[in-house]
Image: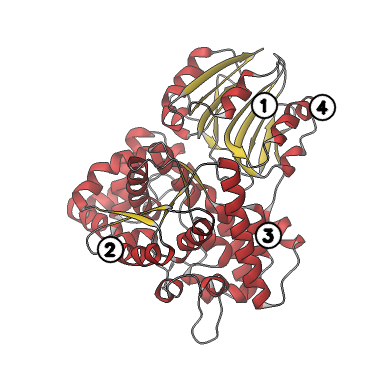
Amino acid sequence: MSGIVFYEANSKKIVKDALKILKHRGRGSKKLIEKGKYTLGITANTGKKSINVANGENNETSLLIDGWFYDDQKLDELTERFKNKDYDFLKEIDGIFSLIISGKNNYLIARDPFGTKPLYYGEIDNKLIFASEMKAVVPFTDTVSEFPPGHYYTPDGGFQRYFSIETLSKRVNKITNTEKASEIVKEAINNAVKKRLDHFRKKPVTFLSGGLDSSCVAVAVAKQVKNVKSFAVGNKSSEDLKYARKVAKKLGLNHHEYKYDREEMLKILPDVIYYLESFDESLVRSAIPNFLVAKLAKNNNGKIVFMGEGSDELFGGYHYLKNLSLPEMEKEMIDLANSGHHMGFQRDDRMNNANGLEYDVPFMDKHVVESALSIPADWKIFGREEKIEKWILRKAYEDELPKEVVWRKKDQFSKGAGSSENIESYASEIITDREFKNERHISDKVTLRSKEELLYYRIFKKFFPYKRNAELVGRWEPLMLNA
C-alpha cells in the first residue's frame, strides 16, 4: 500500500503537497527524491520494500511502486532494463502495481494489466504530473485524466500498450471437458492464494458477502491457513449476514459481523465519496458496506484482505448476460473485465486504503484469468430454459460450500448488505422532482440517472469541482441495463 507521485519539473513543494493528500495510502514512511529535472515521491507503510527501493543503490535510477511483484527478484532487473530502454519486462511481471522508474533524463510510468492499482495524470504549466489518486492532481490542474491499464508512458514514446485481454483471449486454448474445467479453475484459485500467502508471509483476513465469489476465496485460504478471520456487514434485515455465517461455520472461520443503520450510512457518505472518487450509483452503494467492513477488519488487527472481486466479469456473474448470444456474451465479458479498473477494483482499492488495509484479488491472478478465458461462455452461463450464471464456478465448489450459498442467486453487494434501499429512499425524501430535472445534466458526457446519483454528485462536486472530473468517473453501463 503506497501513494506515489511524479512531476516533470523540479518542485519539491508540489510533490510534497500531493503526498500529504495521499497519506492514507501509506501512514508510515515518506520519501522525496530529486532526480535531475524531475521530482518524485512515495508515502508507504513503514518497512515497505518500495521505500528501500526508492533510496536506490546508486544515484542514477529510482524505482517507486504502489503494489507488489510476487517474484521479488524481478525488482532487481528493472533498473538495468530501463536504462537499456528494454520495456518488455512489463509483460513478464506477475503482480499488481503502478510504478515509476526515473533516471536523470528519462522516466517510465506504468500500470498493471487490469488497473488493479490506480494512477492518474494531469498537466501543470506544460509539465506532466502523475499520482495514485485523482484527488492528488485536482488541486494543481483541471486537466486530469486516468492512466490507462496495461499501458506505460515515456517522454519519448508517449503511451504504449503492453497488454490486451482481447489478445490473451485469442491465445488461450479452449477447454472441451466440463469436469476438467472445474478442476482447472479450482486449482488456479488455490495456487493464486498460495502464491499470495507465500509473498506476504502474514495471515490474511477475508470479507464474506455470503455470495459465491468471496466464499470461493475463503475456501482456498482456509485450506492453507488455520483460524482465519472473516468479516461481514449489513443492516438488520441483510441476507448477506445470514449466508456469511453459514460459510464461516462450514469452513471453521473466526467470524465477525457488524450491523449498521441508515444514520451511520449517511454519516460516512462524504468520506466514502471523497475516498472513492465517484458518484456512480451502483459503485457508491457497494462502497458503503465495503468501507464499513474494511474498518471492521482493521479494528480487529487485519493487515491484508483477500477479496472475490473479478469473478463476475470472468465467469459471467451478471443476469443480463443470459439474454445475449454466445458471441455477444463473450465480447461483453471481456468488456466487463476491461472496465473493472474504474468500477470494482476502484472500490476495493479506495475503501481498503482509506482504512489502512491492504488487499489482493486472487481472481485476477494471471493464471486464473487465463483459465477463465479458456472456458466456453456457455459453461459460464449454462442451461436452456433456466440459465445459471457462473455455472462452472458453482460446479467447482459445490462440494465445499453450503448448497444454498453455491446456488444462491446473485445480488449486488449493496442489495445483499442492505445499503441500496436505505439511500434510495433518503434521496427521494430530500430531492424534489424539480431539483432533479434542473441539476441532472452535468455536461454533454454526463447525465445523472436518479435522485440518488444526484445526492452523490452534490457531495462529489465539493471535492472534485471541475466538469472534467465528473467525466472521468466510471459508469456502470453494461450492454443491457437490467443487471
| Residue type at numbered disc 1 | Ile
* The C terminus: image quadrant: bottom left
Instruction: Say whether residue 41 is visible.
Output: yes
What number is the disc on residue 238? 2
- Above or below, 218 relative to 131: below
The part of the image, by quadrant, that contains residue 270 is: top left
Disc 4/disc 2 C-alpha distance (Å): 56 Å
- Label pair 3/2, CB-CB below 8 angstroms: no
Which label's residue is closer to the chain start, 1 or 3? 1
- Above or below, 157 relative to 240: above
Disc 4/disc 1 C-alpha distance (Å): 13 Å
| Residue type at numbered disc 4 | Asn
- Residue located at (59% from left, 31% from top): 65
Local crowd size for mark 1, using a 10 Å CA cut-off: few (<14), some (14–19), many (≥20) = many
Question: Which of labels 3 and 4 is toward the front?
Answer: 3
Which label's residue is closer to the chain start, 3 or 4? 4
Disc 3/disc 4 C-alpha distance (Å): 31 Å
What number is the disc on residue 370? 3
